[in-house]
Every structure is written in structure tokens, then in C-alpha cells.
Image: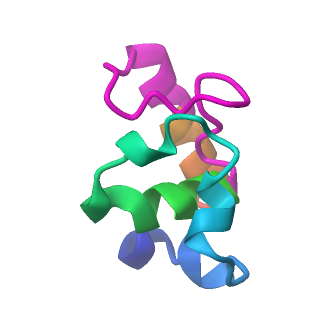
Amino acid sequence: MRKVTGLSDQLPAQDLNKILQSYDDAKQVSLWARDSVADVLQAGIITGRSSSQLAPQAFITRAEVALIIQRLLQQSELI
């Protein structure tokens, strides 16, 4: 996401832990993915399965993928 869209350059700097702290299952996010998950949360690309659950180890549906792609393209002003 960072190189293709330039979206992360537009995000204000925030503490990774502060962004993830409102999700009960944030510790299940793999260490290698934490920065990117925080970026897409901050950008509004993903919002989690609920206000307190990310479900990072769950399977993702086609509808969720379609919504993520749509939000990414809109936020990046590519559509």
C-alpha cells in the first residue's frame, strides 16, 4: 500500500499501540503486519469485524475484500 498509493504519506504520525489498543484481539496481529494494520485502520480502509474485534486470524470474505479494495482506491484518489 505504501509505495503504490502513497496513502501512508498522508497519514498523521501516531503511536502504533494507541491505534490498536481499542481492539481486544490486537495481540493476535502478526508482528510483521502490525505497522500495516495500523496504517489501514488509521486510513479507514479496514474497520474490524466490530468496534472491538479485528479478527486478524479469521478468513476474509469476498465482500470484505471488495470493500477494502474500494476504500483503498477511493482514499488514494485512484477512483
Q: Is residue 16 magenta?
A: no
- Could you say where residue 55 lies in the image, as x and y percent from the top left? 45, 27
Q: How many marks?
A: 0
Is residue 16 depicted above or below 30 in this figure?
A: below
Q: Does 62 sit left or right of 67 as displayed?
A: left
**Secondary structure mostly taken by the magenta-highlighted segment of the chain:** loop
Q: Which residue is at 59% across, 23% downward?
A: 49
Q: Which residue is at 59% across, 35% downward?
A: 24
For the record, the magenta segment spans: 43-67
Is residue 19 depicted above or below 50 in this figure?
A: below
The colouring scheme, among rainbow, by chain, secondary structure or one colour, is: rainbow
Q: Is residue 49 magenta?
A: yes
- Could you say where residue 30 lies in the image, as x and y percent from the top left? 29, 51
Does the rendering let one see residue 70?
yes
In the image, 40 versus 18, the foreground residue is 18
In terms of image quadrants, where is residue 18?
bottom right
In terms of image quadrants, where is residue 65?
top left
Is residue 31 depicted above or below 24 in this figure?
A: below
Q: Which quarter of the rendered picture does the N terminus lie within?
A: bottom left
In the image, 68 versus 29, the foreground residue is 29
Does the rendering let one see residue 77?
no
- Could you say where residue 53 lies in the image, as x and y percent from the top left? 59, 28
Q: Which residue is at 73% across, 81% downward?
A: 12
Q: Does 49 sit left or right of 4 as displayed?
A: right
In the image, 38 versus 2, the foreground residue is 38
- Could you say where residue 22 lies in the image, as x and y percent from the top left? 70, 45
